[in-house]
Image (spheres, helix red, strand yellow):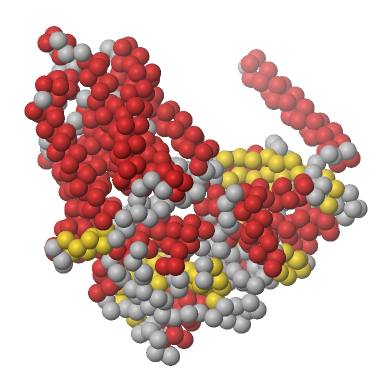
């Protein structure tokens, strides 16, 4: 009985102390703040580190350096505050990313949070961003459910489209090429049995059916598969002119190599994540020409070209051709919204939702909290991965089919 | 079709066997369950990548650098980290637990160094990615090389272990580490040699795999897992067991992918693993544990 009471007392005292500290700390920090605290949790180790290390983390580092070199984040009154970074490694574990984001919000009390890498992780932290009132600019998250998510989490923004967008764009290109007689209407398709592959292939099946494309081979394979020769042999024997693989980076690299060995020359070769990685273009050189995938860039956009050069100079690695530039653009939007509205997260979120911003991808704005001006399909042409769909967007390149046969080296 | 599937399967299995052979030596003879094994494989892969991209040294020549380096690394790790554990262990089980914990730590040390030096990016390069025609089947030259190396290493080690006095001593240590000193075998030296040899095999495997597989600094654990399955299935410490178990896995995976569904390859791997263990609890070539 006695101990119980003592514990009660301790608890109350502690609670009181916390309340007091919070009450004192908040106004004080608002008056004489020396910096803007920006925090993020990212996969620096574990299986997701590969993707995060290409698309997300280098852009965070580049942006923070850019901002701090220019004197800091500009506020509405014209004053500038440097960025103070709080970084956590989520070790590619979704429990860890949730814990880190919670910590950023409650203990580190950061002013703004940047997002983790990956669709699953962005979904995992979305309720937390929402509960603590942080705007969430989810870039490396591909989801068809964005319209519903926006309803549920008002301050969430989805910037990379959904599986249906990419699948429909591909189906349209194939149907168009089929009409001109450049390719037959048969498709062989494989997909990785994991988030990305499942999403894309379930979107692709109806999209192909609608446009009258016949899927003659449709198989999934487990994550970590390294030998694709059985699938390539089947696809080769199927007589399809188009081979589509909704694959992860290691698979994308392996499929490219093994298709060359097998002299498998589909007229259309569409591969998944990894096709837009700088290493892909470097490894495959001329043989990359004509290969299609998700994403792309406008090669004549000067701002984007400058960004790519700076990215390589500062971080030592080239950006990819899909999510990288969007990641940097999302940070520029946040920076501009802070400049217009200050550090009030509510006002910044509202500004993000309604404002128009100049970024490295040109004039950018959200429609219903989603970025819809994206390249749905890209193709390697002359050593650059250019956007070829949607066809009515400014700066689009013309799709070149059929792709040239492999040059044996 | 049948021949194609069989040959592709054998070549895939060659990769598995190549990676598993070093682990079977380390676990079977030195009695160290090395969880950092895959990290050594990846470190060698990065070494081959660096040699190839920075200095233009072909990975085949890189083998001549990586394998001795792997041997030296294994030798040093055993001397510095494992020797004290062996000295204080009072039975086999306690050494196993201690070595698992110690090498689990080592895993993160090697991984951390690789992350700092090379970053977390996917790494790959292309070497010997040319078609070779074997019995009407097109195979990739780099994968064929892995198969040939696995067969050569397995054959060479088998002869070494069964036909030489030195090999017999190693096997004696593997069978009865307590009794081996009675006939004048330096158990510590033999175990150290086996561990170092395992390191050399891991490094050789890493170099060959880097020619055709995309890897990251954190993907070592995948190789440890696969190698562990092969080692347990083949019988701990048995080189020919590792070779045949690796080849069986490769052939089964390819047949399942060709004739059933590529989605079932993982399930097939574990099904065959289960069947073998039910049929022979100590592995294909294993002795019944006393």
Side of A166 relative to A357 (left or right): left
Query: Looking at the image, which residue is at 49% across and 34% down?
Result: B113
Q: Position of residue A55 (x, y in %)?
A: 57, 55
Q: Is residue A177 above or below residue A113?
A: below
Query: Looking at the image, which residue is at 39% across and 67% down?
Result: A245
Query: Looking at the image, which residue is at 36% across and 28% down?
Result: B73
Side of B204 relative to A54 (left or right): left
Residue A37 appears in which quarter of the rendering?
top right
Side of A383 relative to A370 (left or right): left
Q: Is residue A305 visible?
A: yes
Looking at the image, which is closer to me, A35 or A66? A66
Q: Position of residue A75 (x, y in %)?
A: 85, 52
Q: Residue furthest left?
A: B163
Q: Is residue A144 visible?
A: no
Name the quarter where the N terminus of chain A is drawn. Answer: top right
Q: Position of residue A324 (x, y in %)?
A: 60, 59
């Amino acid at each position: 009985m006695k101990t119980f009471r003592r514990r009660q007392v301790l608890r109350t005292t502690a609670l009181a102390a916390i309340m007091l500290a919070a009450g004192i700390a908040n106004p004080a920090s608002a008056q004489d703040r020396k910096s803007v605290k920006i925090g993020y949790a990212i996969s620096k180790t574990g299986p997701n580190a590969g993707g995060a290390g290409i698309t997300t983390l280098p852009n965070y580092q580049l942006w923070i350096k850019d901002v701090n070199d220019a004197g800091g984040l500009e506020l509405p009154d014209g004053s500038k505050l440097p960025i103070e970074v709080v970084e956590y490694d989520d070790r590619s574990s979704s429990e860890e990313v949730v814990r880190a984001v919670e910590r950023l919000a409650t203990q580190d009390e950061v002013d703004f949070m940047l997002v983790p890498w990956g669709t699953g992780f962005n979904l995992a932290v979305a309720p937390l961003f929402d509960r603590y009132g942080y705007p969430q600019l989810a870039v490396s998250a591909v989801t068809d459910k964005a319209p519903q998510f926006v309803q549920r989490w008002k301050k969430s923004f989805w910037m990379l489209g959904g599986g249906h967008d990419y699948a429909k764009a591909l189906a349209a290109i194939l149907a168009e090429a089929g009409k001109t007689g450049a390719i037959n209407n048969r498709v062989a398709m494989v997909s990785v049995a994991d988030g990305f592959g499942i999403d894309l292939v379930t979107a692709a099946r109806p999209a192909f059916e609608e446009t009258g494309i016949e899927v003659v081979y449709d198989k999934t394979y487990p994550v970590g598969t390294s030998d694709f020769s059985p699938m390539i042999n089947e696809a080769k024997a199927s007589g399809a002119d188009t081979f589509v693989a909704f694959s992860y980076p290691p698979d994308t690299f392996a499929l490219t190599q093994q298709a060359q060995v097998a002299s498998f020359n589909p007229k259309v070769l569409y591969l998944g994540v990894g096709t837009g990685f700088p290493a892909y273009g470097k490894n495959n050189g001329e043989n990359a020409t004509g290969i299609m995938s998700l994403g792309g860039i406008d090669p004549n956009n000067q701002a984007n070209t400058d960004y790519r050069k700076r990215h390589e100079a500062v971080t030592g690695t080239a950006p990819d051709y899909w999510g990288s530039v969007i990641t940097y653009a999302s940070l520029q939007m946040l920076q501009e919204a802070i400049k217009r509205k200050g550090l009030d997260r509510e006002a910044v979120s509202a500004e993000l939702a309604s404002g128009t911003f100049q970024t490295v991808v040109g004039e950018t704005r959200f429609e219903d909290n989603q970025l819809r001006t994206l390249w749905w399909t890209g193709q390697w042409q002359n050593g650059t991965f250019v956007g070829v769909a949607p066809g009515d967007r400014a700066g689009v390149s013309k799709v070149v089919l059929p792709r040239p046969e492999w040059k044996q080296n | 079709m049948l021949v194609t599937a069989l040959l592709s399967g054998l070549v895939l299995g060659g990769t598995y066997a190549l990676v598993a052979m070093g682990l079977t030596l380390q676990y079977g003879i030195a009695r160290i369950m090395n969880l950092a094994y895959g990290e050594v494989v990846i470190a060698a892969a990065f070494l081959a990548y660096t040699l190839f991209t920075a200095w233009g040294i072909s990975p085949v020549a890189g083998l001549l650098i990586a394998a001795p380096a792997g041997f030296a690394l294994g030798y040093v790790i055993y001397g510095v980290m494992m020797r004290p554990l062996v000295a204080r262990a009072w039975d086999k089980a306690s050494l196993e637990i201690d070595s698992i914990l110690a090498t689990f730590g080592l895993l993160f040390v090697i991984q951390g160094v690789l992350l700092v030096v090379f970053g977390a990016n996917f790494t790959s390069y292309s070497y010997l990615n040319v078609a070779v025609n074997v019995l009407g089947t097109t195979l990739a030259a780099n994968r064929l090389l892995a198969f040939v190396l696995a067969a050569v290493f397995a054959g060479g080690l088998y002869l070494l272990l069964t036909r030489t006095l030195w090999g017999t001593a190693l096997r004696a240590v593997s069978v009865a580490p307590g009794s081996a000193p009675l006939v004048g075998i330096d158990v510590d030296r033999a175990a150290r040699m086996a561990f170092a040899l395992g390191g050399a095999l891991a490094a050789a495997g890493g170099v060959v795999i880097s020619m055709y597989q995309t890897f990251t600094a954190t993907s070592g654990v995948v190789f440890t897992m696969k190698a562990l399955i092969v080692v347990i299935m083949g019988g701990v410490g048995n080189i020919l067991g590792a070779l045949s178990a690796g080849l069986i896995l490769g052939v089964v995976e390819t047949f399942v992918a060709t004739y059933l569904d590529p989605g079932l390859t993982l399930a097939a791997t574990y099904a065959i693993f289960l069947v073998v263990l039910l049929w022979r609890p100590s592995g294909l070539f294993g002795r019944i544990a006393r």
